[in-house]
Amino acid sequence: MNDLSWLTARPIAHRGFHDMNKERWENTLAAFRAAVEHGYAIECDVHVTSDGVPVVFHDDDLRRLTGSEGQVWQRTAAELCALQVGRTREHVPTLAEMLNRINGSVPVVIELKGIPGHDTGLVEGVLKCLRNYSGEVALMSFDHWIVRELARKAENFPIGLTAEGESDSALEAHFSMLGHRISFVSYAVAHLPNPFISFVRQRLAMPVITWTVRNQADMEKSFRYADQITFEGFAP
């Protein structure tokens, strides 16, 4: 396994170092710039547009973040980049634009958001953006079909499973993904500890990061059962 010590070396700002969407909104260039200024790693979310361009945006629906109607996959990159995020002057950034601004200054953890039937080209688009990027990058997804595709195509990057749950069925599904070249796990802090996380850390020596840590208690819990936090709403 390649050295992933950089993944757990510093706290990871969830959707950038935003201020809970008061003035500095999530997944904007302003939030990413603030994370860099504070020396935090960055977690971001990526969808693919109707014309195959990866954009940095969490929801599949546009309303909460832009006030517009419709789905991300229904819009072109140009249409999305013309939308303002919240009540700010920030626009929806493309992944290429974000990476150009960060320029390797801090590690980036990219969560790929799959939409069944509407995510063709997502993995290829992300890898195209990363082709000439020299910074530290990890790729992850909740979606098992995306993780499997990453395992086949993203040979030069660490691949992670984003996961949650405590039920036997949930844990069984997570265990099934260990056969697909994942090299780290991002797990819901609310569902720690559990046998899956204990196994990957103790038996496989695989790093685990947690999401989403919003207070001191969850940070302390994370460091009992995992290796690093993905945080928001405070400065760790």
Image (cartoon, rainbow, N blue to C red):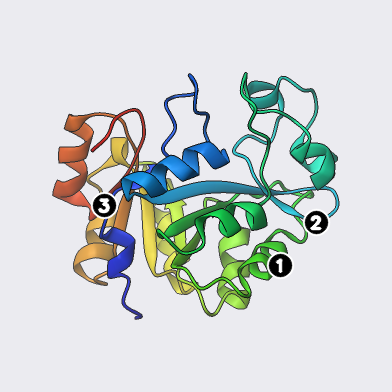
Label located before the other in sequence (1 or 2): 2
Residue at the image position 27 percent from the left and 34 percent from the top: 235
| SS of the residue under disc 1 | helix
State the separation of the CA atoms marked 3 and 2.
33 Å
Q: Is residue 212 above or below residue 139?
A: above
Label located before the other in sequence (3 or 2): 2
Check disc 1 and give the amino acid type.
Glu
Residue at the image position 65 percent from the left and 62 percent from the top: 126
Q: Residues within 10 Å of mark 1 (few under 14, many from 20)?
A: some
Check disc 3 and give the amino acid type.
Gln
Q: Residues within 10 Å of mark 3 (few under 14, many from 20)?
A: many
Query: Which numbered marker is on residue 124?
Result: 1
Residue 172 rendering spot, x and y as whole percentages: 41, 55
Check disc 2 and give the amino acid type.
Gly
Q: Are marks 1 and 2 in contact (CB under 8 Å)?
A: yes
Residue 61 rendering spot, x and y as whole percentages: 70, 30
| SS of the residue under disc 3 | strand
Residue 12 rendering spot, x and y as whole percentages: 35, 48
Query: Which numbered marker is on residue 225?
Result: none
State the separation of the CA atoms marked 1 and 3.
28 Å
Q: Taking the image as drawn, is residue 16 in sight?
A: no
For mark 3, what is the residue?
Answer: 228
For mark 2, what is the residue?
Answer: 52
Instruction: Name the quadrant containing residue 201.
Output: bottom left
